[in-house]
């Protein structure tokens, strides 16, 4: 049940079997049905979620009353509202399952306890956050410096399997254009 998480941790840091057992004893897997929410605006984000199965999305409703997806989370990715989690203030985001999913929740208390007992987890989470920050910086460059079509082409070549799992309107929201424009781009192939 926790194998995918332990493999992911071991890609970045070494942990013993005893440490792996401790990690598993402090966490639990939660199943989420398609379209169900882990977080809604006005609620405080309770955890950082490791996606062990399925696909989730993080989004908000913009001033035009449209969904604006800022992040997807699929297997071996983390998803959360870090601002709400860190400040314990109500979130402005939704976290919703795009497919039936399973997540492993790391509350702040659990993370503090486990990083105290297993110091190399600090390194693991630092590396994960560095990668996430780098991805966010790249996304800003893509949005500000690339045309809509260039963004789509780059995304589709970088994540070809992802395109089969995400509804077209969600992909368009994430890439920053309309579903109609995405249809035109795909028709050009």
Image: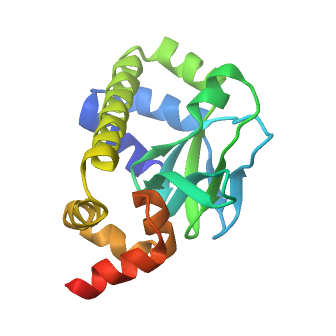
Q: Is 57 situated above or below 171?
A: above
In the displayed orientation, state which residue is furthest to the right. 42
Asked if one can make out residue 167 in the rendered structure from this viewpoint, the answer is no
Q: How is the image coloured?
A: rainbow
State the residue at coordinates (50%, 12%): 116
Asked if one can make out residue 74 in the rendered structure from this viewpoint, the answer is yes
State the residue at coordinates (52%, 38%): 24
State the residue at coordinates (50%, 73%): 169
Q: Is residue 142 left or right of residue 21?
A: left
Residue 146 image offset from top left, x and y in percent = 24, 52
Q: Is 73 situated above or below 110?
A: below
Residue 130 image offset from top left, x and y in percent = 32, 27
In the displayed orientation, state which residue is furthest to the bottom. 187
Counting every numbered tag in the picture gives 0
State the residue at coordinates (55%, 70%): 99
Nearer to us in this view, 177 or 78: 177
Q: Is residue 158 left or right of residue 38?
A: left
Residue 82 image offset from top left, x and y in percent = 57, 31
Image quadrant assignment for residue 47: top right
Nearer to us in this view, 1 or 36: 36
Image quadrant assignment for residue 96: bottom right
Q: Quadrant of the C terminus?
A: bottom left
Image quadrant assignment for residue 11: top left
Q: Is residue 133 left or right of residue 14?
A: right
Residue 39 image offset from top left, x and y in percent = 70, 48
């Amino acid at each position: 049940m926790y194998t995918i998480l332990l493999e992911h941790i071991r890609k970045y840091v070494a942990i013993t079997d005893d440490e792996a057992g401790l990690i598993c004893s402090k966490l639990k897997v939660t199943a989420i049905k398609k379209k169900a929410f882990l977080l809604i605006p006005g609620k405080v984000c309770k955890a950082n979620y490791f996606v062990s199965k399925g696909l989730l999305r993080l989004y908000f409703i913009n001033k035009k009353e449209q969904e604006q997806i800022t992040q997807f989370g699929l297997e071996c990715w983390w998803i959360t509202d870090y601002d709400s989690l860190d400040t314990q203030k109500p979130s402005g985001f939704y976290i919703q399952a795009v497919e039936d999913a399973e997540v492993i929740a790391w509350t702040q208390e659990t993370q503090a306890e486990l990083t105290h007992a297993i110091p190399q987890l600090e390194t693991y989470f630092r590396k994960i956050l560095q990668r996430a920050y780098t991805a966010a910086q790249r996304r800003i460059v893509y949005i500000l410096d690339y045309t809509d079509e260039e963004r789509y082409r780059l995304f589709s070549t970088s994540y070809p399997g992802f395109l089969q799992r995400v509804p077209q309107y969600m992909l368009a929201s994430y890439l920053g254009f309309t579903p109609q424009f995405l249809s035109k781009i795909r028709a050009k192939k």
